[in-house]
Amino acid sequence: MTLWPTNFWKLSETALQRPSSVSSWIFWWRWDTVARSRTPERSSANPATGGIDGIIKQDKLGLDAIYVQAKRWQSVVGSPEIMKFSGGLTKRHANRGVFITTSTFTKDALEFVEALPQKIVLIDGRQLASLMIEHDVGVSATKSYTLKRLDLDYFENV
């Protein structure tokens, strides 16, 4: 179980206000957290690729993959952007993708992904900041506590 510090939301908002830290986080998230023990591969983000920024191969043979798109935007991401990403997935016969943004998604975008045959995970700025904190990216611990519980098994043998 993860216990969040009382200043969690303040820390999240501060991270989101610093685009360079969020850009670093997007890079780290794509190539380390999601790709840990996988085979990441960069893809050029141009219209012909459907906006796909990266491919994470689920196994060394590349039999299954997760496609990633990351947007550092101030405005909300709507369903047209998700449709383009979905189209890029369809073009590659892919069924899984992750769309990351530093902003938020519109209600239409959230509803659109629910109706898709592909599994697309949407990660907005707040979730991104939470993941940064959870995985110690761009944050450092100021205090550490040890919580102890009573070991009842110890007393059964006494």
Image (tube, helix red, strand yellow):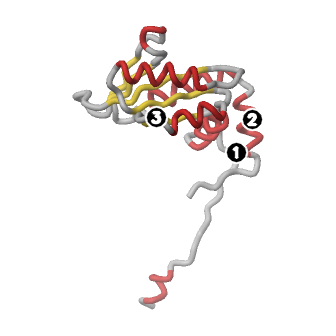
In the displayed structure, does residue 82 sit left or right of residue 66? Answer: right
Q: Which residue is mark 1?
A: 142
Which amino acid is tagged 3?
A: Leu
Which amino acid is tagged 1?
A: Thr
**Residue 157 against residue 145 in the figure, above or below:** below
Which of the marked residues, 1 or 3, is nearer the chain's N terminus? Answer: 3
In the displayed structure, does residue 26 sit left or right of residue 86? Answer: right
Residue at the location (71% across, 38% down)?
Answer: 12
- Secondary element under disc 1, as helix, strand or loop, is loop
Point out the frontmost of discs 1 and 3.
3
| Disc 3 crowd, CA 10 A, few/some/many (<14, 14-19, 20+) | few
Point out the frontmost of discs 2 and 1.
2
As drawn, the label of residue 79 is none
Tell me the CA gap for discs 2 and 3.
Answer: 31 Å
Residue sitting nearer the eye, 114 or 157 = 114
As drawn, the label of residue 13 is 2
As drawn, the label of residue 116 is 3
Residue sitting nearer the eye, 24 or 44 = 44
In the rendered image, which quarter is residue 10 located in? top right
* Image x and y of residue 103, in percent: 67, 27
